[in-house]
Image (cartoon, rainbow, N blue to C red):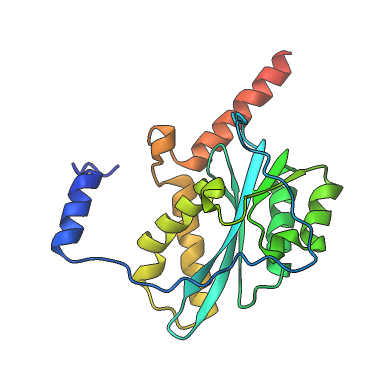
Amino acid sequence: NEGHGVNQKRIRRLMRLMRLMPIYQKPNTSKPRKGHKTWPYLLGGLRVDRPGQVWCADITYLPMRRGFLYLVAIMDWFTRKVLAWRISNTLEADFCVEALKEAIHRFGAPGIMNTDQGSQFTSFAWTDRLKRVGTRISMDGKGRCIDNVFIERLWRSLKYECVYLHAWETGSQAKAAIGRWITFYNHQRPHTAHGGRPPAVVYFNNIEIDQQAQAVA
């Protein structure tokens, strides 16, 4: 975007020359809770071709100078736009439900919500909220992170481009930095799946096209 002639191969070569490589320990944030109901995976063979048709959510960890925090994000499957996010120092379901409420309030309810089988997403608070707005619940097969591949790619980009470059002391520092990066990701960062257009541009362009089509109809 700034006129520099670079590509992924050159970036990889330069990183190898500089010996840049992330080394990290990844806690397991996807443990189901005994007694919680799990739901079938609904996205196999489904054609997702519009915003709001499918959302996905996931939790990852944020390493700090001392310990780590947890981050949940809710993403639109078609456009890859991050719709809402929250940071917490525990793995209770509350921060996930708060992010879900914000996303629904701002963008309306999705047709399907896909997550892993973690206890936060099988909790009554999470599933009840989805059922009350008429959203169908979908969950990855056990041990199949590839079922939620787009949000896994978000975590990879976030960590390589932001998280691993810092050693935050406080939660407020982490929150501010994550907020800046997600704004950059949504509105400026080129996305290969959309021909270099950022997710927010694709999201709002499609919403506008749908509204125009409905007005004509």
Quarter of the C terminus within the rendering: top right
Q: Indicate the quadrant where residue 90 lies.
A: bottom right
Position of residue 127 relative to residue 110, above or below, is below
Q: Indicate the quadrant where residue 94 lies.
A: bottom right
- Comparing 32 with 49, the one in front is 32
Residue beneath the point at 74% across and 60% down: 122
Residue beneath the point at 46% across and 86% down: 66
Coordinates of residue 10 in the picture (x, y in percent): 18, 48
Quarter of the N terminus within the rendering: top left
Residue farthest to the top, as pictured: 217
Position of residue 61 relative to residue 67, above or below, is above
Coordinates of residue 127 in the picture (x, y in percent): 79, 55
Counting the numbered discs, the total is 0
Residue beneath the point at 68% across and 39% down: 42
Residue farthest to the bottom, as pictured: 66
Coordinates of residue 207 in the picture (x, y in percent): 62, 31
Residue farthest to the right, as pictured: 132
Q: Is residue 165 left or right of residue 28?
A: left
- Comparing 192 with 36, the one in front is 36
Q: Indicate the quadrant where residue 5 lies.
A: top left
Position of residue 126 relative to residue 25, above or below, is above
Coordinates of residue 179 in the picture (x, y in percent): 51, 62
Residue farthest to the left, as pictured: 17
Residue beneath the point at 68% across and 25% down: 211
- Comparing 44 with 135, the one in front is 44
